[in-house]
Image (tube, grey):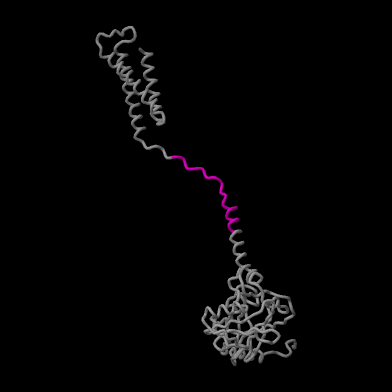
Amino acid sequence: MIVFGCHVLKMLHLDGMASEECEHCERRRFLQALGLNAYFSAFNLARNPNADISAFMNPAQLRRLFACCSVSLTAAMMASCSSMMSPAPPPPPPVMAPAMDAPESASASRASSELASSRVQERPGLGTSAGQEKYSVLEDARLIRKSDTPDAVDSFHYNDEAGAKTMVEVLGGSLSKHNGLFSAAGERLKVGLVRYGDVFQHYDVSGKRIVIGQNGSHYDIRLENRTKKRILVVLSVDGLNVLTGQAASPSQAGFVLGPKQSYDVDGFRKNSTTARAFVFGSVARSKAASKGAAGNVGVIGMAVFEEDEARVKAELLKEQQARGGANAFPGAR
């Protein structure tokens, strides 16, 4: 009977372990049934007054075995119920594969760049490229602006004959051509594109001017100051400052023109003595396209600043006072 009791406890222990493994439900039910049979067999044997068990154990030992079986079976059943009522453990987090986005992103970026490049190649009309270098002296000049905000901002467009006509038709204007320079920046300037002194013709539609260029021709930008004051003109071609070749802003450097002065800007500046000529060409070969800014081709802009004459006079007075105190022989004792 002691051996029988040990077998009962072993079966109940196995049943408790099996109850924790939900995937072995059939085995658990079998072990629970077997444990219950052993329990009730011991229970009936203990209740039967005619059973002769003296050869195996005395009544006290049988009662202890029965109590042990009861406790073990109860614990096993509670563990089984707890196991069945407890929610299943959450699945482990998925293992992430090494990221492979970089090559795909680079490929997508290349495809986008190639698509943009092909679209630029297919664009009709003119842009401005930087042509041959030429000797061109540019002297430094200083002008005090009245404000950081321009006194006037203006622009005009250019294109080949077909493109200029199409723009005029879109704007609903007349296809009559105009010769000579035209007013800009609130009558402060007269401007135009010239070649060997000859001015390119232009259309004038609802205040918009479209200059008619020719593929392969170089050009200068003529600026005429129509005021009686010194002015500063920040000039851009295809969205690029002609002095720096960078994206244009009104706050940048420009050209200082005296009263009624005229000046021909002859190219993108390389330094104070060299410029690269403005040349009409394809959009794809334009300087703007080389900088990824082909969307700005075909426009020439001017930001005009008038000089702050009051500050100029104050500085001149201060300078004269400084000169009045100059010592002709500072080394004399």
Residue 28 percent across, percent down from the top left: 38, 26
Q: Is 92 contained in the magenta span? A: yes
Viewer-proximal residue, 114 or 330?
114
Viewer-proximal residue, 78 or 154?
154
Tell me if I can see residue 268 in this picture: no
Tell me if I can see residue 247 in this picture: yes
Quarter holding the C terminus is: bottom right
Residue 22 percent across, percent down from the top left: 40, 31
Q: Is 44 contained in the magenta span? A: no
Count the marks: 0
35 to the left or right of 152: left
Quarter holding the N terminus is: top left
78 to the left or right of 289: left
**Residue visible at 65% across and 75% down in the picture:** 128
Viewer-proximal residue, 67 or 304?
304
**Residue visible at 73% across and 75% down in the picture:** 132
Residue 324 percent across, percent down from the top left: 66, 92
**Residue visible at 65% across and 86% down in the picture:** 199
**Residue visible at 31% across and 14% down in the picture:** 62
235 to the left or right of 79: right
Residue 192 falls in which quadrant of the image?
Answer: bottom right
Residue 263 percent across, percent down from the top left: 66, 86
114 to the left or right of 171: right
Residue 142 falls in which quadrant of the image?
Answer: bottom right
Q: In this view, does 33 lie above or below 110?
A: above
Residue 209 falls in which quadrant of the image?
Answer: bottom right
Q: Is residue 45 above or below residue 250?
A: above
- The span picked out in magenta is 91-109
